[in-house]
Image: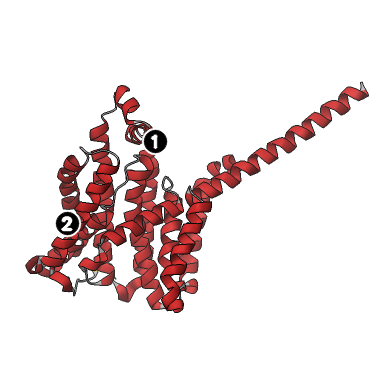
Amino acid sequence: MLKILNKYKWLLLAIFSVVFIISVPSIVPNHYLRIVLGNGLVYVLAVYGLVVMLGMGGQVTFSTAGMMGIGAFLTGIFTVKLGLNSVLALVCSVILTGLFSLFIGAALLKLRGNYFAFASIAFTQVLYMIFRNWKPVTGGPDGISNIPALDLGFIQLNQQTVMEFIYFIFGLALICGLLLYRVRKTSLGRSLESVRDDEIAANSLGVDVYRTKIIAFIIASMLAALAGSLFAFLNGYVSSETFTFEQAGIYLIMAMLGGINSTVGSFIGTITLTILPEVLRDLKDYFRFIYGIVVIITMIFMPMGFAGLVKSLLTKLDHKFKKKKEIVTTGEVDTNGSDS
């Protein structure tokens, strides 16, 4: 079964993409829910960064929300305050965040394990305080509003064209997912996996552990910045309350729920946890309790996430199929032997 899925994975991806594009307008007819779905797809890009850092590299980080905030606020500053073209603002936001992450990563990644995780928490908190209190630049608690649409020339993407925006972000998510798939096959991907499994062994094999982790941090930060910039264009505003430590924890849960080392699993986990609060919204006072219970139960019974569960089930099916095949083959041999 696993071999069949692997053989036809590109066909399955194409079928899924077509089904998604065709079915979304009818499945999500409400304008508000379409905006929620659009934000969910934006979060997918940010969570992909965790696939690189935690899934491939084994580094627990809470910096996703902070880097996403940098990308979002830079986009707001470039477009609203400086009047820059929206596409250029997006590109500049991602590149500048990447450069910033180079210097921050060089400092933070001198720490290892839990120390790096705690440092990333502190870093996210510092960024949150800057976003909230640097009023002349970030707008303080009010944030930055009236961010224009993402102008692609042939169409302007914002909440008024939310379906087109959904298709655009979905396309970017597919492209980024395919790029991450390719990264796994490169020397960088193999280096990240060796660092994740055993840093000392990786170093003894000639892997530059420090450099490898910095590259992963830059990739993750740029993906988060891309998500932040798209979030700003989709919602038309940015606020410090969107980029808190709590939100960073939610991104981590999204990645773990879907499967931390799976781009497809992360996609599913992110969309699920984005839509789930809307499904439970009518429960009001019990919403957070039920939400937490659902996540806890899921993580207990699916520690490797959706992707791990599916892989485990398919592996069991393969074993059962092989056993049946062996029994049939053995029976045929016995029959032939008795006939002779």
Is 277 left or right of 245, judged from the image as shown?
Answer: right
User: Residue 81 occupies which quadrant of the picture?
Assistant: bottom left
Residue 16 location (% of width, % of height): 50, 57
Along the polypeptide, which appears first: circle 1 or circle 2?
2
Q: Secondary structure at mark 1?
A: helix
Q: Residues within 10 Å of mark 2 (few under 14, many from 20)?
A: few
The residue where tag 1 is placed is 185
Residue 225 location (% of width, % of height): 24, 55
* Residue 114 tag number: none
User: Residue 43 occupies which quadrant of the picture?
Assistant: bottom left
User: Residue 39 occupies which quadrant of the picture?
Assistant: bottom left
Residue 191 location (% of width, % of height): 33, 32
- For badge 1, the amino acid type reads Lys
The residue where tag 2 is placed is 126
- Give the camera-side residue of 212 and 131: 131
Is 330 left or right of 9, judged from the image as shown?
Answer: right
Task: State the residue at coordinates (32%, 55%).
Answer: 46
Task: State the residue at coordinates (37%, 64%).
Answer: 40
Measured along the vertical axis of the image, is residue 326 above or below residue 13?
A: above
Q: Could one spot residue 88 in this view of the protein?
A: no
Q: Secondary structure at mark 2?
A: helix
Is 230 left or right of 25, judged from the image as shown?
Answer: left
